[in-house]
Amino acid sequence: MNKTILVIIDGCRSDGLELAKTPNIDYMIENGTHTLNARTVTPSITLPAHFSIFTSLLPIAHNVLANTVSPNPSSIARSIIDVAKDFGKTTAAFYSWEHLRNLSGPGSLDHSYFINSASIDNLDLEVAQAAAGCLKSCCPDFCFIYLEGTDIAGHRSGFMSTEYLDAIETADTALGIILNELKKADLFDSYSIILHSDHGGINHDHTENTPEVMTVPWIAFGPEVRQKYIITDKVNIIDTAPTLAALMDIPMHYTWQGRAISEIFETNVFEMVQPAFLHSEFDCRPFVHCN
């Protein structure tokens, strides 16, 4: 049915996943395709990184270079949400950081849910419950789920602190809410899921150009995705939007700089025209209303 879910765990380090107890993420890794050596972009902060994820452009190209409330993206930046909508797909987004409302243009989201991260303790679980309800009742073709608790814990107590690892485990519980709802609603074979982080972190921040900051996990899971497979090619977060487009059987936008990660598929299930851009240095680089 070519439906997709994108889960972003903000500030989740790959080695954090290895230390924390994450049975649901482990299940996706065991039954899907992954790399723990994907790369984020510079600047390695949340809004520029998310714009890179959604528009498949490096920050210098999409022009969102800071965590600003009112970004002014380049005219060439076209989000996967907008592209999906252009091709008749239904879309949804669930998030707790209001800046992320800028990731798509007006009218591109069919369903959205926002809760202020300062207003609730079990933040990621609340977001996941809202997303699960929409997936069950509305079955959007593309669904974005943002889990913020890990980044909050990293800034507050330090990346790789006990609180931070606990927050990764909470994010895993949130993922379990999504997976269980898909199973109960008999939608488990209808959705492919990509889960990754926007950046890592070191000490209490994530602005340094270090492996702890620049290296992120990237996991794909679903009916068309290879099982028990480790990606050998280089992966950058700008490759996510083209891969989602391939999974939804829609074309890449012509301005996108990334590429669909064909290695995740058991067979070559798509033929996508790749842009002329070549990877270079950066590669070493209130509840949902359903209308």
Image (tube, rainbow, N blue to C red):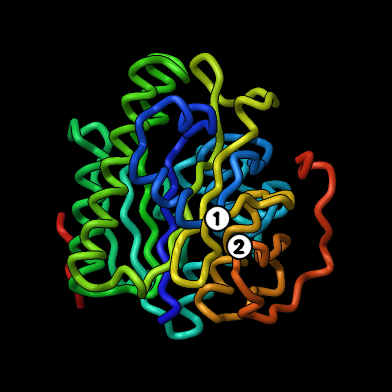
Is residue 67 positioned above or below 176 on the image? above
Q: Quadrant of residue 170?
A: top left
Which x, y percent locates residue 126?
20, 45
Q: Earlier in the sequence, mark 2 or mark 1?
A: 1
> Looking at this view, is 183 or 158 the one in front?
183
Residue located 65% across and 39% down the image:
37
Left or right of 215 on screen, residue 50: left
Q: Please rate how many residues cluster around mark 2, counting C-alpha atoms within 10 Å: few if below 14, some from 14 to 19, many from 20.
A: many
- In which quadrant of the rendered image does the C terminus lie? bottom left
On the image, the x and y values in percent for residue 249 come to: 55, 81
Which residue is identified by label 2? 264
Q: Which disc is residue 193 wearing? A: none
Q: Callout 1: 10 Å neighbours few (<14), some, many (20+)? A: many
The amino acid marked with disc number 2 is: Ile
Q: Residue at x 36, y 75 (%)?
A: 190
Q: Quadrant of the N terminus?
A: bottom left
For residue 143, say whether it is visible: yes
Determine the secondary structure under disc 2: helix
Residue 22: x %, y % from top left = 36, 37
Residues at badges 2 and 1 in contact (C-beta under 8 Å)? yes
Badge 1 marks a residue whose secondary structure is: strand
- Residue at the far bottom: name it: 88
> Residue at left 52%, top 31%?
13
Asked if one can make out residue 106 in the rendered structure from this viewpoint, the answer is: no
The residue located at (53%, 54%) in the rendering is 228
Q: Quadrant of residue 5?
A: bottom left
Q: Is residue 278 above or below residue 204?
A: below
Return the mark for residue 33: 1
In the rendered image, the vertical position of residue 101 relative to residue 242, given as above or below? above
Residue 231 placed where, x, y %? 65, 52
Type of amino acid under label 1: Thr
